[in-house]
Amino acid sequence: MMNSRVAGLVFATLVAMASMSAWAQPQAAASDSAGAQAASAMAAPGAAAPTSRQANRALRRKVYAAIGKDKSINAGNISVIAKGGAVTLNGSVADAAQIGKVEEIARGVPGVTSVTNKLTVMKSFGGM
């Protein structure tokens, strides 16, 4: 009884060890190649992301500077989001005429491909 139990344990141990070593080699090779593919896939967008972020920030600054040059517009309540040449204007201006003017200024900035204008007219505190 004891011999068959020991023999069963030894056999199970040998089978487990053989299967682990048999699976470890192909799996290691597959994980190495998968890891290399994942690393190369992550490296490409990772390298491009800072460049596009920098370009978006630079375009945003250019739009802000262009709006700031027009002294009739208070750019303090305007936010600019730039993504790949597409610019979104958010915030408020003093009167309705400035909404179109800000959009026109943004469209004139080199590198801007489209403008989404979400500007509103600032309401006065007096309620009039």
Image (cartoon, rainbow, N blue to C red):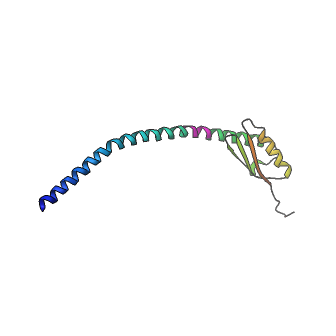
Quadrant position of the N terminus in the picture: bottom left
* Magenta span main SS: helix
Query: Residue shown at 78%/52% (left/top)?
Result: 119
Picture coordinates of residue 101 (x, y %)?
83, 45
Q: Nearer the viewer, residue 102 or 19?
A: 19
> In the shown orientation, is residue 13 left or right of residue 95?
left
Q: Which residues are magenta?
A: 47-52
Picture coordinates of residue 40 (x, y %)?
48, 37
Q: Is residue 107 magenta?
A: no
Picture coordinates of residue 113 (x, y %)?
73, 39
Query: Residue shown at 78%/38% (left/top)?
Result: 108
Picture coordinates of residue 67 (x, y %)?
77, 43
In the image, is residue 15 above or below residue 58? below
Name of the residue lying farthest toward the bottom? 127
- Can residue 72 be seen from the camera position used here? no
Name of the residue lying farthest toward the right? 128
Could you say which quadrant of the image residue 31 lies in? top left
